[in-house]
Amino acid sequence: MSRRLCVSRKWFSLKGDIRFTDEAGEPAYQATGEFAAIRPTWTIIRAGEVVARLRKKPKSWWLTWEVEGEAGVFEVQRKMWSWSRQYTVVGGGLDGARISGNFFDLKFEMRRGSRLLARSAGDLLTLQDRHQVEVLDGNELFVVIAMLVLLLDRAQDTAFLAVN
């Protein structure tokens, strides 16, 4: 059975607050970040309980997020030198799962082997970064973590391009 989530992030939020709502518009998850230049930490909350923590791995060759929580302990690593965003899960119950996006960062798919776990589509030209996510198979929390990594990575790249 599939479930749909809507992910939204305000573009000009300093602290960082990303909300995941269900089909009825009810809160499902909330991700909150700490303002830290060296090692940002994000916390994912469901129903008032912390269910996962993500930390950016310092001094790594690849962009890597360390994850711990209900979904286990694992890393999400970005493949460098690619025209689109490509990520791999290392460790944990979904070891080897891949997350891939299209060139414009509006569509993503999450797969483990030939199994499609989730897919998402972003809204174009809005004041919020919004994605509709369809969780098809597997761990919903993993999909939330993956979408959070994608949004944070994209926001970092956008900020880097704006400064340079």
Image (cartoon, rainbow, N blue to C red):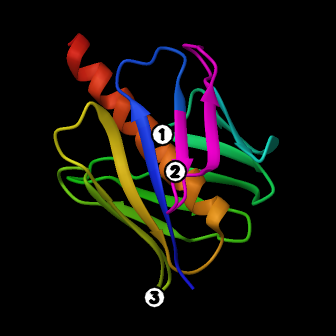
CB-based contact (under 8 Å), mark 1 and mark 2: yes
Disc number for residue 77: 2
The location of residue 70, given as percent across then percent down, is 81, 57
Amino acid identity at mark 1? Leu
Q: Is mark 1 on a helix, strand or loop?
A: loop
Q: Give the range drawn in magenta.
A: 18-40
Q: Earlier in the sequence, mark 1 or mark 2?
A: 1
Label 1, label 2: how far apart the Cα atoms are: 6 Å
The quadrant of the rendering that contains the N terminus is: bottom right
Q: Earlier in the sequence, mark 3 or mark 2?
A: 2
Amino acid identity at mark 3? Ser
108 sits left or right of 111 in the view:
left
Q: Earlier in the sequence, mark 3 or mark 1?
A: 1
Q: Is mark 3 on a helix, strand or loop?
A: loop
The residue tagged 3 is: 114
The location of residue 19, given as percent across then percent down, is 54, 40
Residue, x 73% and y 64% (percent of image)?
Answer: 92
